[in-house]
Amino acid sequence: MIRRYLNEALTLGVKEFYLTGGEPFLHPEIADILQEALKYGPTTVLSNGTLITEGLSQTLAQVSRISKHTLEFRVSLESFIEEENDQIRGMGSFKRAIRGIQSLVHAGFNPIITVADWSKYGKFTKEMAEGFHSLERSLNIPQLRLKKLPLVLLGRCAEFVRPYDESERVTEKCFDNYPMDNLQCATSRIVTSKGVFVCPILIAAPKAWMGWTLGESLGSYTMESPACYTCRTSGLTCKNEYLEAKDIVRESVNEFYATAAIQPQKELCCPSNYTPADLSHIPPEVLNISYGCGSPVTQANIEPGESVLDLGSGGGIDCFIAAKMVGEQGQVIGIDMTDEMLRNANASREIVARNLGFDNVRFMKGFLEEIPLADECVDLVTSNCVINLSAQKEKVFQEIFRILKTGGRFVISDIVSDR
């Protein structure tokens, strides 16, 4: 059965494979299954780690060595503190999981630790991230990698925390200006002995059953489960997207500006040289959350018809000023990582478009270090007091160089320090 699904997946262009459960290491032929899966693409095992032994790890290392594809392991914990973990997972589970992680490290693997975000209701704090990274260092894990998953308020989680509220459902409006490929169900399926389901969270939901083949499963699915609300609001994915030490900075910045988007903070609004003509088409709500340290767009000599990208666009003020300058034949793109800022910017965009008589602005979710645009696609990149917030400034400049057209330019307003 597994080989049949792997063959079909290959014809459909599937790029990577994940084995989950239950607990995959309960299967007596897990090593053989992994050896087969690795013939088709990179493979990851999601495990609680308690059944991983030194002998099994060495066997898996041998399987990995003879494959051209990578073999990854994700081991889940509830806490970096033994007592807190065992309160949820059961007495002794923490020690067994730690032994499993150590066995993988001894065999040459670099396991990812997965943690459920039980603290929401506190959110995933910087202290929690640092606690897990400290645990990883103590286990001599070569590269510190931490994947956090939001709470899905079903099953035992609904008992421990709370069930979903009736209002926590997605609507069509939730997906306005939202890239659907961000949804896990847009790019993946879960295969079980009972057929193919739309996602691993919903394998107990009859309506999530999509058929007996991957081809049948490509049909549409109505997102009526409350779990879909979590996916939409949190960006939940089973992919190996993880939090490195540098990402702690990103998390802190994101939380700070999410709050500032909802509750305007005047002390963050620095003086600028905007003129009344610059602002005449922009609603006052944008000015209230205009956090920067200058005005790069007014210094950029923008010409009609140009394409402009603003990094860390926030509430959109520099994008809206640039929109008037480039005119109807030009285009302006704002990139920001904070959902709350993007919501505000998109709401104001409609007003700006009415005032200008044309709509040439769009906002996208993304990171400065991973700009979601093609090579050599913009004439101008601007940034207003944002690059200082990145822990990977060199990567930011590499990305800017990548997306600028030949002869393009970059205008920055930012703060600097020699210490």
Image (tube, rainbow, N blue to C red):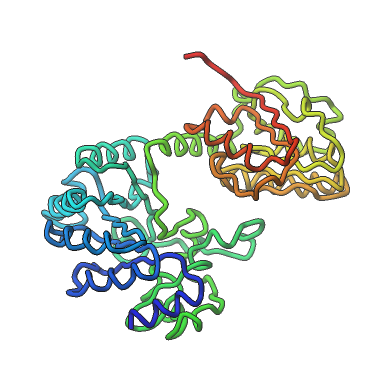
- Return the x and y of residue 371 as percentages of the image width and height: 59, 45
Q: Is residue 75 above or below residue 380?
A: below
For residue 331, side relative to residue 6 (left or right): right
Q: Is residue 148 visible?
A: yes
Residue occupying the far top of the picture:
418
Query: Which residue sits at x=54%, y=27%?
Result: 388
Left or right of residue 226: residue 180? right
Identify which residue, 16 or 317, lies in the foreground: 16
Decide which of 309, 8 is in the foreground and name it. 8
Estimate the x, y position of residue 315 in percent, counting from the top left.
66, 38
x and y, in percent, of residue 140 in the image:
21, 40
* Picture quadrant of residue 68: bottom left
Is residue 232 found left or right of 54 in the rendered image? right
Quadrant of residue 200 within the rendered picture: bottom left
Q: Quadrant of residue 276?
A: top right
- Figure quadrant of the N terminus: bottom left
Identified at 42% across, 86% down, the residue is 212
Residue 86 visible somewhere in the drawing: no
Give the x, y percent position of residue 202.
40, 72
Q: Is residue 322 left or right of residue 90?
A: right
Which residue is at 64% across, 49% downward?
373
